[in-house]
Amino acid sequence: MRWISLLLLVVLAWFAWALLTLPTESAALRLPAPSPGDPPGVRGAYHVHSQASDGTGTVADIAAAAGRAGLRFVILTDHGDGLRRTPPPRYLGGVLCIEAVEISTAGGHYAALGMAPPPYPLGGEARDVVEDVARLGGFGIAAHPDSAKPELRWDAWEAPFDGMEWFNADSQWRDERRWRLLPTILQYPVRPAEAVASLFDRPAGLLRRWDQLGSRRRIVGLAAADAHARMGLGGKTDPYDELVYVKLPSYEAIFRAFSLHVELREPLSGDPDADARAVVAALRAGRVYTVFESIAGPGALGFTAESGGDIARQGDALAGSGAVRLRAVTNGPPQTSLQLLRDGEVVRQADGPALEWDADRPGAYRIEARLPGAPGEPPLPWMVSNPIYVGRPAARHEADAVPPAAARHVWPAGTWRTEHDARSTGRAETTASDGGLIRHTLRFELGGGAASPFVALVTEEVSAMHDAARIAFRAGADRPMRVSVQVRLLDGAVERRWQRSVYLSPEPREVTVSFADMRAVGTGARQAFAPARIHSLLFVVDTVNARPGGGGALWVEGIRTER
């Protein structure tokens, strides 16, 4: 009986703790009357998973939850390589559903919006996926860069990606200790959105990273729902692989906790294709801010910069040759405080729902609004804007290209051969190109059923590479594709390879591959290697960016080493 009494006391303490720490109910606000110059706004959610990948809801379920939460659009980012045929934009119950894709790379996950269908699977190194998404006209976002799982965490910070998630709800609550989740389980049925948000903190590290990038170039920051409505109960490393789960936190709870407010040029028309293009264009332009309605809502923010009669809004650049007046106004209560940050540093703080300040230096300026009683440590901001770029500096100076050295080595016809797995086939051909260069052609067909189908054009005649810093060549292919340029090093019986993927198409191009820019195959690690130990040079086609059973041809010519 004693242990039963003890257990009862523990349960009662658990209930008491949950009641005493019940999150404050969201404050209800009135939206202000719109000013004549205010752009039309629309609320929505970005980064949502359905049954098409690791979410639990159908698109109709998700749209219904969004509608109940007062949202007008949702952007679904189910996992894939871009080849899955997705439905066109459509309205379900008054909610605009926009299909996008979350791509797994060797350096984290990358969400791509508004992208044309790719000619091959997207994957491999993060920088290559960033390049491919841009080539296909997409808007790419580094997803959950602070994930607790290393394989999901973004690490390609030098890549020219378009945007980043400064906040990810899934990462926020999954990094909490189990004891911290206990009271939330009891609080959730009473105040779902507030209970979920009670696990949120201000992601200081990600905001600092965003500000650092924004001080050098334009970059859009988004708050991501990363909603799955799925919590695994088996304790596996990846809860989304578990067969036993509960549908928590719900899509509706996440959608009520916070939302994106997108500033459009025109109100939504009801035409799903046109409206989807307008929403994605506004996100791409950075005309978006985040409101945590679990603190107070509905929220509204106006943020402008004016100079010489020119007015800039979020995402815009303002030359700022003269005086620049920055203004921010919210519909918050008197206890609202506003912070104006320039490149991450607070330059002005105002007590109250409005702020004005004259900019005295160039920089990326953004707003954070705060309300007392916000959850988290450090406390979660109520609103976060995107930057206005005032007098932004010129693009970073790129180092002058090193002039190519004269060709130090011409690979004779007999030194090239093919390698491939047992089910694939390849044939090497050597001819003279129209320019009198030696052209090496690889005709390939990737087999099906093999664990890792591949075909490679290979040479061991690599002595000229031993004191070089890079190789250069001209190349093309019979269709858009990627080829992995690799060097193989042997340490006794141990083989190690480094690679750099390059894009090829029927339009031939000059390519330079620096050894310092190559990554270790298999890990993607940035590890230096000694060129003097290079054993082989390979041009490899594999299933990172091709499908089993596919075939084609690529060619390289004028291969030379450079110092």
Image: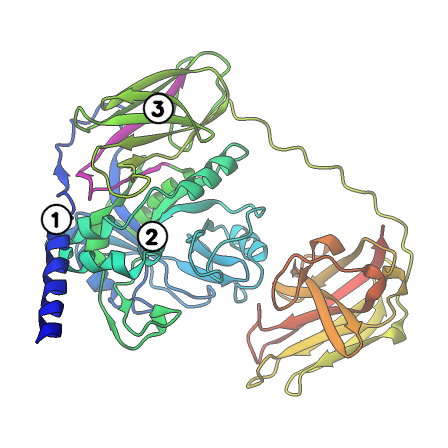
**Spatial distance from mark 1 to mark 3, Cα to Cα?**
42 Å
Give coordinates of residue 332: x percent, y percent: 19, 29
Q: Is residue 42 magenta?
A: no
Q: Which residue is mark 2?
A: 172
At mark 3, the secondary structure is strand
What is the number of callouts on the image? 3
**Residue 292 falls inside the magenta stretch:** yes
Disc 1 crowd rating (10 Å Cα; few below 14, some 14-19, many 20+) is few
Residue in the picture at 14% in, 63% down: 10
Q: Which residue is mark 3?
A: 304
Residue 497 position (above or below residue 471): below
- Span of residues in magenta: 287-307
Helix, strand or loop: magenta stretch: strand
Q: Nearer the viewer, mark 1 or mark 3?
A: 1
| Among the two numbered marks 3 and 2 on one chain, the one whose residue lies closer to the N terminus | 2
Amino acid type, residue under disc 3 in the picture: Thr
Local crowd at mark 2 within 10 Å, few (<14), some, or many (≥20)? many
Q: Is residue 303 above or below residue 358?
A: below
Q: Position of residue 81 (x, y in %)?
A: 47, 65
Left or right for 175, reference 483: left
Q: Give the residue at mark 1.
A: 20
Q: Is residue 434 visible?
A: no
Neighbours of disc 3 within 10 Å: few (<14), some (14-19), many (20+): some
- The residue lying furthest to the front in this view is 2
